[in-house]
């Protein structure tokens, strides 16, 4: 089968959800992975799995044959700019007509967040190539709050250095559905979408919602970001990631992620899910 859509990151957190949405709506694609074993849960007659490493251009020969649209999605990591720019260069050589890049809120070459700078540099690289593009910039995902489950179970308290910052968190289900629409319907070329939820909540409000859901008093403790970084280091998180998360948390604490946009509903024709909707579906994780 000749596929016209190349999916990267489709064995990862965000990309696998987009891949599932594509399959649920009967859209086929080619899936690039370093390890085809990781793609077994996405196997289907609609999926053509190819092995390759974005860090090794020589392993990517033929990957773009017949491809018109590239979905570019890799983890936030120090190699991200190099990996994604490699693929963009190949996409241009192979005549790809549309690059859909998974980016992030705050993407900007002059962002206060290193992760935002990485996305900004890749976006600029794509713009210089003059290939039609769509930049998807989701806000902090509601799913990230599942990381509180363990400490809520242990001590009815969760710890994160967000002070009184409000965040218009968005549900990954909505983001993945919107990505599927962008990849499979016309009219998204040369657009930048900021995907947000319908409300900007403080983490005191998040704690109140968790208290209601669980029928107990859940407390939010806004610890200092250095204390949070030390705890992450002790838990084995690499130093560069701790530093990047500190920057992200400062960004959120300063209220820079509280804007609410209509982009998600414009792309999906649906109302974005609230945090209450998300919690109802994830109650079991906190018990
Ligand atoms: N979490 C959030 O709140 C949030 C919000 C907005 C935006 N984002 C953005 O979403 C993006 C994706 O995040 P994620 O959590 O989904 O990442 P992730 O799960 O860590 O991504 C892993 C995926 O990247 C692929 N990959 C990594 N290196 C590769 C390489 N050298 N060659 C080929 N494929 C490679 C992996 O493929 P294989 O292992 O199969 O080869 C796997 O499919 C990030 O850039 C992040 O900034 C996240």
Image (cartoon, rainbow, N blue to C red):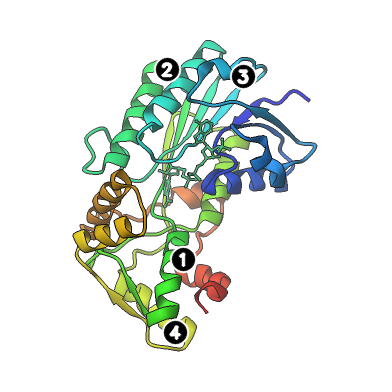
Can you tell which quarter of the image residue 155 is in? bottom left
Q: Is residue 93 above or below residue 197?
A: above
Neighbour tally class for label 3: few under 14, some 14-19, many 20 plus, Cα within 10 Å: many
The first of marks 3 and 4 along the sequence is 3
Q: Is mark 4 on a helix, strand or loop?
A: helix
The spot of residue 117 in percent (x, y) is 28, 36
Q: Name the residue under label 1.
A: 146
How far apart in space, not on screen, are marks 4 and 1 (Cα)? 16 Å
Q: Mark 2 points at which residue?
A: 130
State yes or no: discs 3 and 4 in contact (Cβ < 8 Å). no
The yes-or-no answer for disc 2 within 8 Å of ligand 1 is no
How far apart in space, not on screen, are marks 3 and 4 (Cα)? 50 Å
For the question of whether residue 258 can be seen, the reply is no
The first of marks 4 and 2 along the sequence is 2
The first of marks 4 and 1 along the sequence is 1
**Quadrant in the picture for the N terminus:** top right
Image depth: mark 4 or mark 1 in front:
1
Question: Residue sitting at 35 percent across and 46 percent down?
Answer: 105
The spot of residue 197 in percent (x, y) is 43, 59
Image depth: mark 2 or mark 1 in front:
1
Question: Residue sitting at 43 percent across and 56 percent down?
Answer: 141
In this picture, residue 225 sits left or right of residue 178:
left
The first of marks 2 and 1 along the sequence is 2
How far apart in space, not on screen, are marks 3 and 2 (Cα)? 18 Å
The spot of residue 62 in percent (x, y) is 64, 16
Question: Residue sitting at 68 percent across and 40 percent down?
Answer: 37
Q: Name the residue under label 3.
A: 64
């Amino acid at each position: 089968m000749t596929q016209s859509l190349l999916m990267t990151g489709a064995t990862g957190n965000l990309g696998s959800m987009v891949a599932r949405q594509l399959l649920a709506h009967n859209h086929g694609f080619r899936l690039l992975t370093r390890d085809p074993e990781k793609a077994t849960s996405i196997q289907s007659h609609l999926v053509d799995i190819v092995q390759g490493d974005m860090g090794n251009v020589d392993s990517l020969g033929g990957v773009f044959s017949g491809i018109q649209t590239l979905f570019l999605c890799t983890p936030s990591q120090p190699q991200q700019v190099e990996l994604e720019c490699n693929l963009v260069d190949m996409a241009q050589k192979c005549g790809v007509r549309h690059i859909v890049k998974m980016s992030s809120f705050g993407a900007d070459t002059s962002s206060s967040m290193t992760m935002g700078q990485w996305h900004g540099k890749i976006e600029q690289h794509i713009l210089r190539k003059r290939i039609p593009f769509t930049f998807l910039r989701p806000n902090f995902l509601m799913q990230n709050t599942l990381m509180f489950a363990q400490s809520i179970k242990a001590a009815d308290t969760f710890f994160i250095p967000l002070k009184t910052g409000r965040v218009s968190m968005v549900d990954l289900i909505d983001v993945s559905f919107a990505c599927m629409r962008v990849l499979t319907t016309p009219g998204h070329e040369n657009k930048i979408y900021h995907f947000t939820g319908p409300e900007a909540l403080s983490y005191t409000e998040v704690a109140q919602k968790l208290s209601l859901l669980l029928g107990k008093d859940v407390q939010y403790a806004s610890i200092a970001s250095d204390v949070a970084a030390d705890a992450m280091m002790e838990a084995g998180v690499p130093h560069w990631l701790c530093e990047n998360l500190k920057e992200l948390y400062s960004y959120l604490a300063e209220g820079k992620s509280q804007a609410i946009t209509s982009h998600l509903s414009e792309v999906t024709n649906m109302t974005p899910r609230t945090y209450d909707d998300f919690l109802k579906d994830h109650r079991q994780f906190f018990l």
